Amino acid sequence: MKRREFLSLGAVAAIWLLLATTHSRLSDMGGPVDVMVLLAVALAGAIGMAIFVYTIGSLITGPRARRRA
């Protein structure tokens, strides 16, 4: 998987966690504020997954050799 594919996974996971925690469904959304909150949660999940993926990637690859100019 490419790194950007993990972003959508993080967004979906965050929305799923939100809905599971609140015992809600998407049909329970009542207005535009709910949509904005849902989008904010998805964005936060995508950012969190990006941080996680880049951190794991840097731990796996380790320090890279510096080039001498």
Image (cartoon, rainbow, N blue to C red):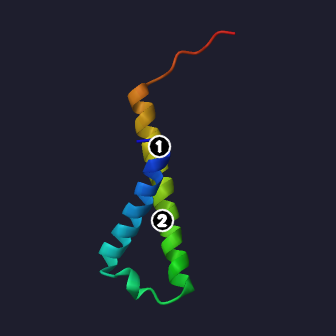
Quarter of image, res 9:
bottom left
Residue density around tag 1, few if under 14, some if 14–19, many if 20 or more, within 10 Å: few
Q: Compared to 47, does 16 lie above or below?
A: below
Q: Is residue 44 above or below residue 56?
A: below
Q: Which residue is at 33% across, 79% downward? A: 22
Task: First in sequence, mark 1 or 2: give its number.
Answer: 1
The answer for how far apart the CA atoms under marks 1 and 2 are is 17 Å
Q: Residue furthest right?
A: 69
The secondary structure type at the circle numbered 1 is helix
Mark 1: which amino acid? Arg
SS of the residue at dot 2?
Answer: helix
- Which residue is the site of mark 2? 42
The residue depicted at 48 percent of the width and 22 percent of the height is 63
In the rendered structure, the answer to whether residue 56 lies left or right of residue 4 reads left
Image quadrant in which the N terminus is located:
top left
| Type of amino acid at the residue the image marks with label 2 | Ala
- Report if the CB atoms under discs 1 and 2 are less than 8 Å apart: no
From the image, tell me which residue sits under label 1.
3
